Structure formats: C-alpha cells, structure tokens
C-alpha cells in the first residue's frame, strides 16, 4: 500500500486527491492536510463581494466529501517536510499543526511515499504597508474577505444614494502583484452595481495597475480574434473600461496605503497619491512558508523552495535577460528535481520567470505583473501530477509520462462584468498557449484560432454554469470525474 499525502485542498490539491482516490481505490491511501474545514470555489468570491452570492453558495464542508470517498483528512497546516525522515526514522514525512478548534495547539505528522504540495499562495498583504482587511483596503481573495468587502461597499453605495460622491480604487496593491483579471472583474462588477442603482454621477471609479498597459493581465497582453478581426487585449480591455466609465492608471506600483489614501510610484520614478473611499487592491503572492529538513536535521528549505517560497520543480530557473526567455523554460511534470517523489501543483510551484516584460522605474523599483496563476492551469497541473503518481504506482516505474506545460496549455478566462440572468455580462477570453511562443507562432506568439475574446450575456451564463458545475464536481457527486478541469 502506498501513501500519497496532498497538502492543500484548493483547486489543485482537491482535484489531485479526488483523482488519486478514484483511480487507486482502496489499495492505496490518500491523505489530505489542509487548514480550513471548507472548500471554496474562489472565482465566485467576486459575486460575494458585490452581494450577489452568499459565502454558503461558494463553499461547503470538506470532511463529508473525504469521508464519502475514503480520503483521510487532517484539518491542519503543514509546517515542514522531512523528505529523508529523521535519524531515528528514515521514512519521509510532513509535520503539521492542527487548526480545528478541538485540536488547536496540537501537532502531528504523516508519512508519505508521494507528496503533492498544493498549498497555493500566501496573500502577502504585509509586503505593502497598510494593505488589506487589517489595514485600509478590501480584498475578495477569500470568501470572508469578500463578505467584508460587500459590507464596506454597501456603506459607499448608501452614501451615494444620499448624494455624497465616492471614489473607488480597484486594482493591484503591490508593484509586482499578479491576478489583474480578478481585480479587473471586481472593478467591472462594482461599476455595474453602481450603474444598476443609477448612481453613476456620484461615483469615480479608478483602475490602478502595475501593468505597462491595460489588458496585459500578467501574460504580456495578447492579440485576440474578436468578431473576425484581430485586436489587442489592450484595445479590448480599454474599451470595456471606457464603456463602464472607469478611468485607469497604469505603470503604477502601490507602495503604501493609509486611511483613504494610496501612495504609488510610476515607471517614470514619480511618486503620486490617490484618495479613495473604497479600495480593493490585490496583494502580492508568496509561498506559504513551508520548511524542509534533510535526514541529519539540516535546513534544506533553500534547496527545495525558491526565494519566493514557491517550490522548485522541473523548470529552467537559470536567470536570463527577457529577450532570451523561452517557452522551454516552463515546467511540465511539476516534479521536484531534488526529491523525485515530491511534486508541486497549482500556484505552489515556482514559475521560471514572469511572462510580462519586467520593467524598473527610474528609482529602481520593479513595477510589472508577475505571471498569472489561474484556476484552469491549477486544476490541470493537479490532475497531471496525480496521473503521474498513479502511473508510477500501477506500473512500478519512475517516469512522468503525463505532461502539461503552461507554454503548451490554453486557458479560458471569463471576466464577469455584471450579474443577472437577463442583463448579466461577461468578457470571455481564451488564450493558447498561456505563455507566448514566438517560435511556433511567429506572428502573434499565440494561435489565433484559439485566442479569442467576446463580451456579452452568454459569457455570464457560462460563468454561472461553471460555478454550479465545478462545485458539483468538487463535492464528488455522481460522475464528477466526467467534468474537465
Ligand atoms: C477572487 C478570485 C477570483 C478568481 N477568479 C478566477 C477565474 O475566474 N478563473 C480562473 O481561472 N482563476 C481565477 N482565480 C484564480 C484561482 O482561484 C487560483 O488559480 C486557484 O485557486 C489556485 O489553486 P491552488 O489550488 O493552487 O490554490 P488555492 O485554491 O489557493 O488552494 C490552496 C490550498 O492550500 C491550503 N493551504 C495553505 N497553506 C497550507 C499549509 N501550510 N498546509 C496545508 N494546506 C495549506 C489552503 O487553505 C487551500 O486549501 C481567482 C482568484 C481569486 C482570488
């Protein structure tokens, strides 16, 4: 019997755990270690943040699902990996701290034959002074954050209804933050709610971003086919912002936030301030802080993890200038080069470099988006890692025949821009591949047959359908495995 331990029950880890158990059955043990008792479908947090969905609609308890499927679940936070065991016990194991109320303060450990690190990102609010729910800005990164955002947004909406002007600042809260798509989606939804209440005249909505130009989305922008024409994501995104009455500030690295005031630097090295009444700014991401120790107890964290805290996998991490970046730098099996029985899926793996061109301001501040870490690649990498482990166990080999590089993978992104069965809106976009490849696609870097975009009501219906479909799948309801990642 083999033991597979999965750290994290998010999109990547939960996908991996369900597939592993489904394909390996009772003969092997699948164990999940994750700190929260609930699964959350994060993409729908946007709708919690505008009061169109409740926290209950985007989350459900994990324990009954894992009990039904025969997966062992520890509600706990992994703290350290011991890939060689210890001097007393040579079996690899993970140390953790329980997080459930009944076991608070208790620690535990679980041995493994294969380990999947799918711990996602640490929301690094601390990297920007004053940022986040404990500071002066809102967040929609978790459903409790999104619930608070909706409470605070209502205060502004009520003030506007009474005739008071309000300024909304939405975008990235760190000079190298990623997830522009999320903030963009929230900005459009806030604008939609304001417009629905006919309060446009009382609102100034500002999109603030570390992108060099609107529509970069951390993937260096793209050329897309829209209505038969080729257009840039810059034109696509700018026209959507203009239509929603949103002003934009680009090339901006937010460096500090105070009550109602954001300080930012632009690429020209100038410092600026922007007042706001309501702000939702995405923090930078870091690894979750897992440590690693070898058999003699020596700290080998720096050997296994990149300085960002994300786990090093089969990528080419050689530092090269932008002009020399290649799609071949990107990983495809997500296997640790140091310990072949350890994998990292979803956001937890370290990318070799950003996709957007790195830029530095005149004062030396790096201001550019780091690579986007979206849901579809997270699910796909969770699946690929699970399939390789299954293959190894069933066929008793050490190969990784299943591969999925972000330079070979497409991504679909539906940016909701208004909720409602009849008047909802969404900008649907697909890009292939995520990482542009000018060798294979010399003209545009991507295949324009699969890199398309279109705004409309249909996109909203698809996004809503995906919400129910992915929650159905995550609950492991009958035939869940037929629903793709
Ligand atoms: C508001 C919002 C909207 C989004 N919308 C979209 C969208 O429309 N489309 C899209 O493709 N992507 C979207 N994304 C991105 C998408 O949510 C992420 O790509 C995806 O959640 C990443 O999956 P993951 O499993 O790597 O990480 P996560 O989903 O963050 O899961 C990480 C898991 O690890 C657990 N964990 C953390 N630390 C530890 C530890 N020490 N030990 C054990 N477990 C740990 C966490 O509790 C969690 O269960 C959105 C993101 C946000 C914030």
Image: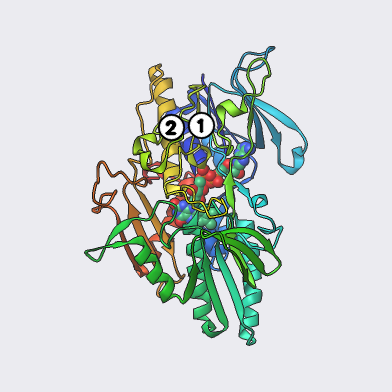
Q: Residue 56 — which label?
A: none
How many marks overall?
A: 2
Question: Residue at the spot x=50%, y=74% of the render?
Answer: 191
User: Outermost residue toward the front?
Assistant: 362
Q: What element carries label 2?
A: loop
Task: Confirm or reject: label 1 Cβ below 8 Å from ligand 1.
Answer: no
Asked if disc 1 and disc 2 are in contact, CB closer than 8 Å, the reply is: yes
- Relative vertical location of residue 165 with respect to residue 96 in this rendering, above or below: below
**5, 476: nearer the viewer:** 5
Could you say which quadrant of the image residue 144 lies in? bottom right
| Residue 302 position in % (x across, y down) | 60, 28
Q: What element carries label 1?
A: loop
Render colour scheme = rainbow
> Residue placed at 66% from the left, 68% from the top?
261
Task: Please state the horizontal and vertical placement of residue 67, each as a whole percent of the image.
Answer: 57, 37
Which circle marks residue 312 in the picture?
1
On the image, numbered disc 2 is attached to which residue?
Answer: 315
Q: Is residue 325 above or below residue 87?
A: below
Residue at the far right in the pictured view: 105
Residue 73 visible? The answer is: yes
The quadrant the C terminus occupies is top left
Q: Does residue 475 appear anywhere in the picture?
A: no
Q: Give the quarter of the image for residue 98.
A: top right
User: Gap between marks 1 and 2, in whole Å?
Assistant: 7 Å
Task: Give the residue displayed 58% in from the left and 60% down from the top.
Answer: 265
Choose between 360 and 42: the one closer to the eye: 360
> Does 451 sit above or below residue 106?
below
Q: Which residue lies furthest to the bottom in this view?
A: 163
Whole-percent x, y for residue 476 in the image? 48, 43
Q: Residue 8: image x %, image y %?
A: 57, 39
Badge 1: how crowded within 10 Å, few (<14), some, or many (20+)? many
- Tell which of 274 and 267 is nearer to you: 267
């Amino acid at each position: 019997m083999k033991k597979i331990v999965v750290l994290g029950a998010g999109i990547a880890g939960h996908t991996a755990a369900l597939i592993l158990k489904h394909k390996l059955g009772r003969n092997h043990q699948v164990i999940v270690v994750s700190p929260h008792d609930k699964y959350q479908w994060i993409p729908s947090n946007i709708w919690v943040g505008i009061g169109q969905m409740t926290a209950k609609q985007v989350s459900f308890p994990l324990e009954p699902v894992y009990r039904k499927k025969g997966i062992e679940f520890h509600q706990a936070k992994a703290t350290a990996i011991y890939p060689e065991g210890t001097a007393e016990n040579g079996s690899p194991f993970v140390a953790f701290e329980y997080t459930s109320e009944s076991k608070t303060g208790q620690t535990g450990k679980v041995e493994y034959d294969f380990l999947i690190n799918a711990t996602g990102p640490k929301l690094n609010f601390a990297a920007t002074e004053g940022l986040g729910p404990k500071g002066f800005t809102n967040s929609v990164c978790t459903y409790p954050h999104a619930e608070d955002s909706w409470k605070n947004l209502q205060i502004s909406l009520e003030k506007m209804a009474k005739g008071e002007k309000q300024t909304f600042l939405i975008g990235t809260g760190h000079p190298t933050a990623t997830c522009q798509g999320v903030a963009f989606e929230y900005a459009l939804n806030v604008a939609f709610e304001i417009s629905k209440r006919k309060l446009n005249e009382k609102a100034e909505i500002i999109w603030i971003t570390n992108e060099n130009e609107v529509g970069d989305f951390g993937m260096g922008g793209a050329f897309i086919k829209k209505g038969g024409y080729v257009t840039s994501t810059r034109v696509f995104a700018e026209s959507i912002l203009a239509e929603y009455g949103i002003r934009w500030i680009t090339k901006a690295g937010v460096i500090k936030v105070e009550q109602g005031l954001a300080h930012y630097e632009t690429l020209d090295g100038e410092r600026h301030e922007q007042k706001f009444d309501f702000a939702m700014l995405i923090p930078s991401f870091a690894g979750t802080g897992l440590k690693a120790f070898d058999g003699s107890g020596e700290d080998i964290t720096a050997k296994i993890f990149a300085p960002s805290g994300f786990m090093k996998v089969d990528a080419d991490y050689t530092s090269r200038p932008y002009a020399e970046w290649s799609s071949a730098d990107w990983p495809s099996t997500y296997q640790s080069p140091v310990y072949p029985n350890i994998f990292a899926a979803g956001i937890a793996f370290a990318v070799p470099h950003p996709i957007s061109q790195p830029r530095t301001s005149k004062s030396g501040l790096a201001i550019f988006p780091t690579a986007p870490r979206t849901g579809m690649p997270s699910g796909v990498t969770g699946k690929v890692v699970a399939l390789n482990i299954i293959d190894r166990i069933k066929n008793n080999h050490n190969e990784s025949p299943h591969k999925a590089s972000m330079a070979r993978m497409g991504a679909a992104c539906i940016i909701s821009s208004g909720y409602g069965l009849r008047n909802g809106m969404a900008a649907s976009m697909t890009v292939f591949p995520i990482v542009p490849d000018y060798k294979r696609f010399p003209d545009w870097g991507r295949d324009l047959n699969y890199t398309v975009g279109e705004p409309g009501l249909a996109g909203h219906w698809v996004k809503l359908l995906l919400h129910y479909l992915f929650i159905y799948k995550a609950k492991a309801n009958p035939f869940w495995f037929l629903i793709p990642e």
